[in-house]
Amino acid sequence: MTTGAVLEATDATFTDVVLRRSHEMPVIVDFWAPWCEPCHILSPILEKLANEYAGRVQLVQVNIDQNPMVTQQFGVQSIPAVKAFEGGGMTSEFAGAQPEDQVRAFFDILVPSQTDHAMTAAQRLRALGDDPAAREQLEAVLADDPNHMDASIELADILSASGDAAAVERARELAERYEHDPRARRAVGRIGLNELAAGKDRAALEARAAAGESDAEARYHLGAVLAVAGEWEDALEHLLATVRLDRDLDEDGGRLRMLDAFAVLGDTHELTVRYRGRLMNVIF
């Protein structure tokens, strides 16, 4: 059976029909022969699913008797042999006649779900700076799969920058489910800094810090305000000074907010590496 969803390939056409096309969508190749009884069981299942998944996956049939070169090239020793190609190379395979549910599972692995499409769209929108639209896509993912880790963390990252208390609380809840993931720690760190900086008068804090270098409280809050403004080095200097001056302030708040800053910046950031070392020297 040859339709738009089911094509045939030969030794001469395999590169075009399979390898090049696999850069556009997954291609499943059914290596078969007319004398193979199991092939006559499996091929109709493959054809049915290929038509069902039309436009998302391509089925290609190769008669091994007529195409020995490609059969040998891909190591086909027994049939039916089914091999999947993506991006110009073989990515998965199975051999022998399989029931429809298992063949469907093979197709599903290759074909992105609606959830996968929404997640990809959200990531693209975030890269373009459109967080509101990305949030809509992420909400759709979580409506379908409430335990989707990547969607939870991405949404937490967006909500953590919100000025809305309910959104921030939801961000914390989502991120804390995956507290060992650096991306989740980033969201929690941003929340900690934002909460400390909220409502603080930067000019007044700067005046206090300039008037008295030992004013731990002023330097503590100023550090958070500067961090939220993206002035990370000055922020870390003030928070480090807080650690030196008063470990009891906000239950070792200076150290904790430095850890929040490190989480936001990332473990490999130059400022994280430098100030983590300086923090250790102060503590120990």
Image (cartoon, rainbow, N blue to C red):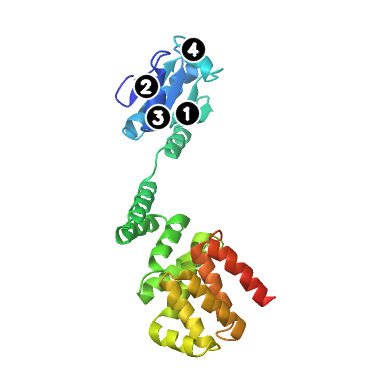
Tell me, for residue 89, which label it has, or none: 1
Which amino acid does the dot numbered 1 rest on? Gly
Q: Nearer the viewer, residue 258 or 37?
A: 258
Question: Would you say residue 67 is visible in this rendering?
Answer: yes
- Pointers 3 and 4 in contact (C-beta within 8 Å): no
Secondary structure, mark 2, is helix
How far separated are the C-alphas under marks 3 and 1?
A: 8 Å
Q: Position of residue 157 (x, y in %)?
A: 42, 63
The vertical placement of 195 against 174, above or below, is below
Give the answer, above or below, for where 69 lies relative to 263: above
The first of marks 3 and 4 along the sequence is: 3
Instruction: Classify 10 Å Cα crowding around label 4: few (below 14), some (14-19), many (20 and above).
Output: few
User: Circle 3 sits on which residue?
Assistant: 22
To which residue does mark 2 refer?
17
Is mark 3 in CB contact (under 8 Å) with mark 1?
Answer: yes
> Which mark, residue 69?
4
* Residue in view at x 44 percent, y 71 percent: 231
Q: Residue at x 63, y 68 (%)?
A: 277
In space, the residues marked 2 and 4 are separated at their CA atoms by 15 Å
Q: Position of residue 144 (x, y in %)?
A: 38, 55
